[in-house]
Image (tube, rainbow, N blue to C red):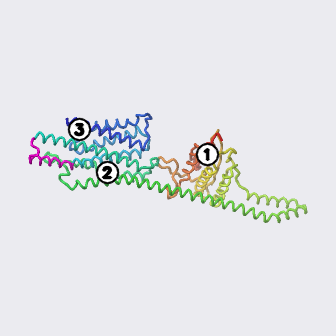
Amino acid sequence: MYESFYEIIDMIAAIFQGWCLQYFYGKFMKCRIQISYGRYLTVVVWAAASLIASHMVQVDYDSMRVVVRLAILYLVLLLVAAGLYQAGNALKFYLSVTFMAVKEISFFLAYMILTVGAHLFQFWEWCLEKGYISAIETFMQIVNATVIALQGIMYVCMLLFTFLILRSIVNRYQEKEYEVQRNELMFILAPSAAGFLFCVLLRMVSVTMENEIPVLLYHKYPLLLLLIPAILLLSLLSIIYGIQLLQDMISLNREKRGRLILEQQVSSLQEHVQEMERIQAGIQGMKHDMKNQLAVVLQLSEAGNTEELQAHVLQMNQTMEQLDYRFQTGNAAADTILNMKYHEAVGQIPDVRMDAEELMFPENIRIQSYDLAVILCNAMDNAIEACRKLKEEDTKFICLRSYQRGSMFFLEVENSFNGQLEVRGQSEFPQSSKKDKHMHGIGMNNIREAAWKYEGAADWEVEGKTFSLTVMMKNVNKNWKEDE
């Protein structure tokens, strides 16, 4: 009877743990099997693996068997994550370690109930000695019922702890789409790994053999009844609040990035104002000098000095051209940005060559000027920064072009650079060369997000010492409707 009870409760526990596993994995990763019951395959695999491992590797008091059984279960977790879910390897590794840590911590916290409840047996013995329990058969029935009740309560608490802890982790881990960096991964992985290894140690030393009689570690050192739960709870809190701290750091970095973007927008506005002031000052100067210039032209014309007259008119024309935009793309916002960035580039790199003859915007362009400004400003800033790092003898150029294929609009920016790029892990774009990686190097991400608004994308390639950026966008205003 009791063996059947333990088998049934082990099966229920394995199934419920499998359900908790699919819930935990499913909140962070996408299941590869796109059918209604696909996620329940995780439940079946975990339950079967747990039951098979418990029967194949009987855990008595051999510490090596304990390690082997836990290693098998962890390997099953990794295989389930790799075979049934889509995500990065780092995330799969972290989730697997965390699940094992939570499962083991929940077991030992619930085991404290069994350890404390063992004092009931002393109470039943006292009752037997005092005659409150008269028959041995009654005493044995009470003892067996107590064992079953304590085991049932322990399993219920263990499963309840497991679910509540995993749900707390899921709720606190708000930035599930965020790509965790290596240092951030180590920050949240360390508490989980430490908690799991501590539980492995407990399984290895919690029961020892003395004169061929098993002795609980708690009986030899009663103070551990307080210390071990305290350590387990601290491990659990470090896992949960480590995640909370990471989420706060991500939010703080996002706010800093937003502030930096705003600062860039203010800086671009200041540059635009300076460009307008430069043109306005030239217009005012030309207006002030126009009467004198016309008087000179009139005198030269009356004198019949044709050559001097032509030279003077040519000089006036050159002066007027300085007030006009150097680049004419068919888009006022793009012309303003290109001219601003040109003067900025020439101011920093006098020998830079900037070509935008093939950059033209169609009259029916529906991409908002703000998004074009984001793309051009960030692309030009990156190109200018790359050219600025070149040696004096190196060729420095920035070339812009555009073309349209059907409803798709393509914008390309090429520039020379020193040939040194750093791309880490699964990162989509090269690393920033600036020291503060979190606060700089966001230009490419801004370009990508602007392209996403128009069902587009941003891509880059390198050929020799030429860096090419291609931005593809659908020529449809994101606020435009066909029926308008």
On-image quarter of the N terminus: top left
Report how far apart the C-alphas of labels 2 and 1 lie in the structure.
51 Å
Q: How far apart, in angstroms, are the residues tagged by discs 3 and 1?
A: 63 Å
x then y, percent, for residue 357: 69, 49
Q: Is mark 1 on a helix, strand or loop?
A: loop
Q: Residue 279: percent from the left, percent from the top?
A: 71, 60
Element type at marker 2? Answer: helix
SS assignment for the magenta stretch, majority: helix
Q: Earlier in the sequence, mark 2 or mark 1?
A: 2
Task: Give residue 425's position: percent from left, percent from top.
Answer: 46, 48
Circle 2/circle 1 CB separation < 8 Å: no
Say which mark, if any, is on residue 195: 2
Instruction: Describe residue 473's horizontal placement relative to residue 422 as left or right.
Output: right
Tag of residue 377: none
> Residue 6 — which label?
3
**Mark whose residue sits in front, 2 or 1:** 1
Q: Which amino acid does label 1 sit on?
A: Asn
**Does residue 341 belong to the magenta stretch?**
no
Q: What stretch is highlighted in magenta?
A: 115-135
Q: What residue type is labelled 3?
A: Tyr
Q: Residues within 10 Å of mark 2 (few under 14, many from 20)?
A: many
Res 411 visible = yes
Which image quadrant for residue 45? top left
Q: Indicate the secondary structure of the residue bearing disc 3.
A: helix
Q: Give the label on residue 479, or none.
A: 1
